[in-house]
Amino acid sequence: MSTKHTIAVLVNDQPGVLQRVSGLFGRRGFNIESITVGQSEEAGLSRMVIVTTGDETTLEQVEKQLYKLIDVIKVINLSSKPMVARELALIKVKAEPSARPEIMGVVETFRASVVDIGTANMMVQVVGDTVKIDAMIELLKPYGIQELSRTGVTAMIRGNA
Amino acid sequence: MSAQTPEVRSTEQLREKWLKPEVITGSEILLRSLLLEGVECVFGYPGGAVLYIYDAMYGFEDFNHVLTRHEQGAIHAADGYARASGKVGVCIATSGPGATNLVTGIATAYMDSVPLVVITGNVATTLIGTDAFQEADITGITMPITKHSYLVRDVKDLPRVIHEAFHIASTGRKGPVLIDVPKDVSAATTLFQPDDRIQLRGYNPRTVPNKLQLDKLARAIEEAERPMILAGGGVIYSGAHEGLYEFVNKSGIPITTTLLGLGAFPSGHDLWTGMPGMHGTYTSNHGIQQSDLLINIGARFDDRVTGKLDGFAPHAKIVHIDIDPAEIGKNVPTDIPIVGDVKTVLEMLNPIVPYAAKADAWRDQISKWKAEYPFRYVDSETVLKPQWVIEMLNDTTKGEAIVTTDVGQHQMWAAQYYKFNQPRSWITSGGLGTMGFGFPSAIGAQMAHPDRLVISINGDGGMQMCSQELAICAINNIPVKIVVINNQVLGMVRQWQELIYDNRYSHIDLAGSPDFVKLAEAYGVKGLRATTKEEAQRAWAEALETPGPVLVEFVVEKGENVYPMVTQGSTIDQMLMGDA
C-alpha cells in the first residue's frame, strides 16, 4: 500500500550532496513530494527532510540506498514515530479593501498572519502541518490567489517518543 | 616491461622516499599517494588538463604507465587489471572528452562492483562553470555510476582524498571512485603530509553477520529436502572461494554459479550444476525452480538470472548473503537476510553447517539432470561451430587460462564451454554488458599476471569497438592471445530477431568489417585465420607457441544460436533447448 513517509537525512554539508540525494531518488524511481535542507545542530552536517510516497518495500529501499551514499550519516523514518511536522506558506491573495475584513477572519481563525499589504492584495503567512495549509489555501482561493510559495515540510520526532 | 632497469631499491627505501614531507606540487602528491596505496600500474591518456600530472610522470619509474589509444581502452584495461588481481585498478584521463570517454567503463565497473580509482583532470577552479574549453561536469555526469566521487578544490585535500578513494573503492561492496583534479590544483604546491587516517562517519560497511541468522540458516539446511546454492561474484571479490568449497562439501548442497561467479567453484565438482539464467543449464534452472531452500551467496538476483520474478523459485525459502544491505529484498523477498562479507560469513557458518541429510533424492535428481541435459550443439564437419572452438580452447589450455570476453553470443558460449576452476580467471562485463570490454580488459589482466596465459575471446562486432589497443600489445609485447569468433553478424541481436522478431533481420550485417588478420598485422601483431577444424587446431597451436600477442580469427557458422534460452518474460524453467 502506497503511503506518505517523512524521512530525515543527516548529511555531510558538502558541495553536491543535495544532488546526490535528489539524483538517487530520481534514478531509482522514488517520488519526492517535498524536500527541505538546512543546518543541523552539529557544525558541518545538514539535515534534509524528505516527504516521499511509496509502499513499505519502496521505503526500505529508499533508506538502504540513502545509506549507501558516503555523505549520508543517518536516515530516520520520522513518520514511523509521533512527530511534529510543519511547513510555512506565503500566499498573496487578491484583497480589495472591501474584502479585507473577511480575509482577516480566515487569517485569525488559522492563527496565520498578514505580513504585507498592497493596494489590491495581501500577503498571508501560515505555519502548520500540510493539512492545515491545504485548508487555508482552499479558503483563500475564492478571493483569488495571485502567488503561492510553500517551504515543504520540516519535521522532528516528539521529545518523549 | 620497460627496457631500462631502474635503480634497485627496497620497498622500505622507496616508501621513505615517497613519504618524505616536502613542498611539492599537487601532481607529485598525486603520484606519491598512488604509490603509497601500492599502485604498480596505471592506464591513461594525457591531455591539456592533466599536463602537470603527466609532467610529474616524466622519467618516472616507480610505477608503470600504459598509454592506451583511447580512454575507453584505459578504463577497461584498469578494470581487467582489478578483476584479475583483486587490487584497485587506476586510470587517468584529461578533462572534457577524456573524462566522458571513461563513462562507459565507469558504469561497467559499477554494475559489476569492480574497485577502480578514476582520476580525471578538469579545467582550473577559476574556470569551472564557465563552459571553458574541454570542460565537463564529470562528477555530476558520473554521480549515478560511481560509489563516490570527489572534486578536489584545494591541493591540501589531495592526500586525504586519494587515501579515502582507495579505501572506499576496495572495501564493502567494491566499486569505482572518481577523483576530479582541476588543473590549478595539480599545479599548486604545498607541504606533502601523507594521510593514512580514515574518518568517514557515513561509511561503515558491515562485514560481520548476525549470528542468529546463521543459526537459522543451519536449521533450514537440516530441514531442506531440495536445497540449492546460487553463488555469485561476491564470492570471488571477497576471496571466499575456499570457504565456499568447504561449505558445499560439508552441506552436500548442489551449487550453481552466476556469470560473474564462474571460477568461484571448481566446475568438475559433482555438485556443480553450471550457470543459471537466460542461457544457463537445465539443471541449474530447474534446480532453482524446484528448490525448497535457495541460498544466495554474493549474487544480486539479476534479471538475467531470475527471469520472470513473479514465479521465480516459487517453493523456496530464500536466504540472501550480501555485503550490500540494499540488495537484500530489492528484487526477491527474502526469508533469511544475512548482511556481511561473504568470506566472513562462510568462516562463521562452516563450523556449524550441517549436512543436508534429507536431500539424498534431490542430489540424485540433480545428477540425473546433469547427465541428461548437458550443453549441446550440432557439430559440423564443413563449417566451424563456435562452441567447438571454445571447447578446443578449453581442452588445449586445461581450463587454466585467464579468459576475458566481450559481450554477446561468444560470451555465452565461453561461459558455457570453458570450464573454470579458479577464481579471477574469468573476466566479463555481466551487469552492463559492455561491448568493447573484452580485448582491453585482457591487456589489464595480463599486466596483473605477466606469467599467465590470457585469452581474450571476442565477436567480430565487439572486436571493432576497441581494436585500437592492438598497438599497446605490440609496443609493450603484451602476449594476450586474441580470439575473434567471426560470424559476420551481430549474433545475439540476430538470434533475438530470428526467435522473437520473426526473422526480421534489421541492421545486423557486419559486412565491411576489416580483414582481422591484416588489422592485427597493421599494428605489428601476428594474425592467423581458420575456417576448418584442422586449420583451427593448427592456428591455435601456433598462437600458443608464439611468445608475443597473436590474433586468431575463427570464421564460424553465421546462423548458430545460443541454447538453452529463456526468453524475456518467462520463468527460468521455460527453456528453449535448441535442436541438439
Image: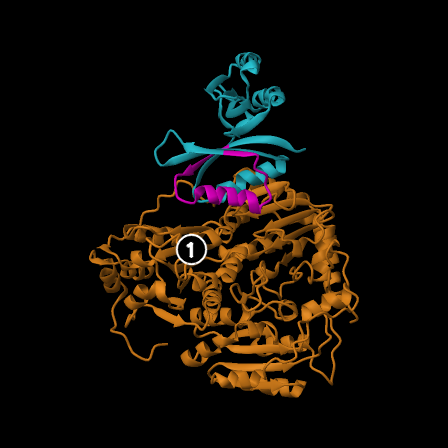
Chain colours: A cyan, B orange
Q: Does residue A17 show up magenta in the picture?
A: yes
Q: Position of residue B194 (x, y in %)?
A: 27, 53
Q: Return the residue nearer the eye: B547 or A84.
A: A84
Residue drawn at x 57%, y 77% is B483
Is residue B193 depicted above or below B561 in this figure? above
In the picture, the quarter occupied by the C terminus of chain B is: bottom right
- Closer-to-camera residue (B215/A32): A32
Q: Residue at x 30, y 79 (%)?
A: B4
Q: Please indicate, yes or no, whether residue B457 appears anywhere in the rendered image.
A: no
Task: Identify the image quadrant of residue B460.
Answer: bottom right
Q: Secondary structure at mark 1?
A: strand
Q: Is residue A149 above or below residue B27?
A: above
Closer to the camera, B326 or B511?
A: B511
- The magenta region covers A8-35
Q: Amino acid at mark 1?
A: Leu
> How far from the left and from the top, in percent, is residue B113?
51, 55
Q: Which residue is mark 1?
A: B178
Q: Is residue B433 above or below residue A100?
A: below
Instruction: Residue at 42%, 51% (x, y): give it.
Output: B149
Q: Which chain is mark 1 on?
A: B
Q: Is residue B35 magenta?
A: no
In this figure, what is the number of numbered marks? 1
Q: Position of residue B573 (x, y in %)?
A: 75, 56
The percent coordinates of residue B286 (x first, y second) are 74, 56
The image quarter in which residue B380 lies: bottom right
